[in-house]
């Protein structure tokens, strides 16, 4: 067994890699608090992983998050870049969280974190990192005297694939859920449009994903439950570029929207938790994938589950991300918890018509041994395969699994 050690001294992170096959890598991360992968994007045949970290301000170094480029063939680390997201760590006990990662058309990456401005206002910070790992710019955003808090999954790619959008709540008002601030930014980080959208809602989770369609309309998935609520209602609301609400889709099932992503065809793919409202009706809830038209008309909707397994597996409680290959096929993943504490991953590949191409299950012995805690983290299609990144939170580690295009 080959043992490879890398010392990422540029941001105080040590990774130790252990490789026993060409497609499996296990990285242990040295951290004062918690470190885990929270984002994954393609980079040619390689991939870029966002490692997020939290540490108390009095346990330096506080800035431990990083963007790491992984060789798509063997899992080697090609470069790593520290992510600046907490410029006032010395005077703050607040944890700062990643809210999104995306890749622009030129190959650079946008990383979104919440932060605190120098005058004490809550805001967000964006880093743009080049394909070579260089920091192109980083900027703080927010409005003076206002607390602007970005959504989880509140980062979406723009129609030209060089601009992007950020959705945020204003926390310092009487009803913070009544309006959403939506920022449309260009590749230089300049705000080209800032809207305050009326939601007509009294409450929704701050985990509400966003997508921007080819006609420059915004689609926001409102999760009306408390955070990730199995019995919560969920809505999709579409706003035009001027901020008018043009359509609202009410889902018949419960759960939450996990991710919205514009398909290469211009349609919208939504991945959600699906709960029928009756726990005894297990075949009706699980991992739901829906293809919508640009007008939010349902083209098809599929639920995948493992209802024939014993109930204690609960293998598809948590929907994961979505990725597309060059042919427009759709790859989704979901994870849950099994009786032995392992969180397996299910990978489901659909074609554009909604037909299931294959289903793969990873993360239960004998697939992977050694106490894997979570496998269904992030996925991305590569030119000739699939890269899956999961987390081992109990030991501050991450797992890289490379599969072929058939999921094997």
Image (cartoon, rainbow, N blue to C red):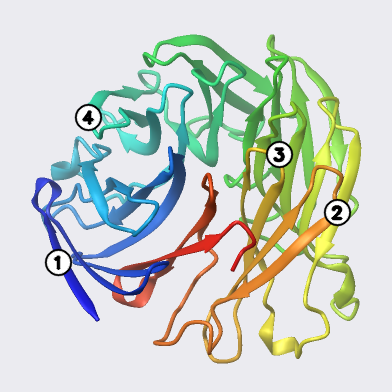
- The secondary element bearing badge 3 is classed as loop
Residue at 34%, 59% (x, y): give it.
74
Query: Mark 1–mark 3 contact, CB under 8 Å?
Result: no
Label whose residue precedes the other's in the sequence (1 or 3): 1
Mark 1 → mark 3, Cα distance in angstroms? 38 Å
* Residue 253 in view here: yes
Asked where in the image residue 46 lies, by quadrant, the reply is: top left
Label whose residue precedes the other's in the sequence (3 or 2): 3
Q: Residues within 10 Å of mark 1 (few under 14, many from 20)?
A: few
Mark 4 → mark 2, Cα distance in angstroms? 41 Å
Label whose residue precedes the other's in the sequence (3 or 4): 4
Residue bearing the label numbered 4: 134
**Residue 218 location in percent, x, y?**
68, 24
Residue bearing the label numbered 3: 328
- The secondary element bearing badge 1 is classed as strand
Asked where in the image residue 337 lies, by quadrant, the reply is: bottom right
């Amino acid at each position: 067994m080959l043992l490879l050690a890398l010392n990422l001294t540029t941001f105080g992170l040590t990774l130790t890699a252990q490789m026993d096959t060409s497609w499996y890598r296990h990285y242990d991360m040295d951290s004062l608090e918690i470190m885990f992968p929270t984002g994954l994007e393609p980079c040619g045949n390689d991939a870029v992983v966002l490692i997020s970290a939290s540490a108390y301000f009095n346990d330096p170094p506080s800035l431990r998050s990083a963007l790491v480029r992984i060789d798509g063939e063997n899992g080697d680390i090609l470069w790593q870049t520290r992510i600046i997201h907490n410029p006032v760590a010395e005077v703050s006990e607040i944890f700062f969280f990643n809210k999104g990662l995306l890749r622009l058309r030129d190959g650079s990456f946008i990383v979104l974190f919440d932060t605190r401005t120098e005058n004490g206002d809550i805001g967000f910070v964006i880093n743009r990192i080049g394909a070579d790992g260089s920091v192109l710019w980083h900027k703080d955003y927010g409005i003076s005297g206002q607390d602007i808090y970005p959504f989880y999954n509140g980062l979406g790619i723009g129609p030209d694939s060089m601009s992007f959008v950020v959705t945020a709540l204003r926390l310092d008002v009487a009803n913070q859920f009544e309006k959403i601030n939506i920022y449309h930014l260009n590749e230089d980080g300049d705000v080209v449009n800032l809207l305050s959208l009326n939601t007509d809602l009294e409450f929704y989770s701050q985990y509400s994903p966003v997508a921007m369609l080819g006609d420059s309309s915004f689609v926001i998935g409102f999760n009306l439950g408390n955070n990730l609520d199995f019995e919560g209602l969920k809505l999709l609301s579409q706003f035009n570029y001027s901020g008018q609400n043009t359509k609202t889709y009410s889902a018949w099932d419960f759960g939450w929207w996990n991710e919205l992503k514009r398909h290469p065809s211009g349609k919208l793919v939504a991945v959600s938790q699906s709960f029928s409202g009756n726990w005894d009706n297990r075949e009706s809830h699980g991992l739901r994938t829906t293809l919508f038209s640009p007008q939010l008309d349902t083209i098809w909707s599929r639920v995948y589950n493992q209802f024939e397994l014993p109930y204690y597996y609960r293998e598809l409680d948590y929907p994961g991300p979505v990725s597309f290959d060059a042919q427009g096929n759709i790859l989704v993943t979901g994870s849950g918890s099994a009786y032995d504490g392992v969180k397996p991953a299910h990978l489901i590949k659909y074609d554009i018509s909604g037909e299931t191409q294959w289903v793969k299950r990873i993360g239960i012995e004998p697939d992977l041994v050694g106490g894997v805690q979570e496998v269904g983290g992030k996925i991305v299609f590569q030119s000739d395969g699939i890269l899956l990144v999961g987390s081992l939170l109990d030991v501050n580690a991450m797992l890289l699994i490379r599969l072929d295009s058939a999921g094997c």
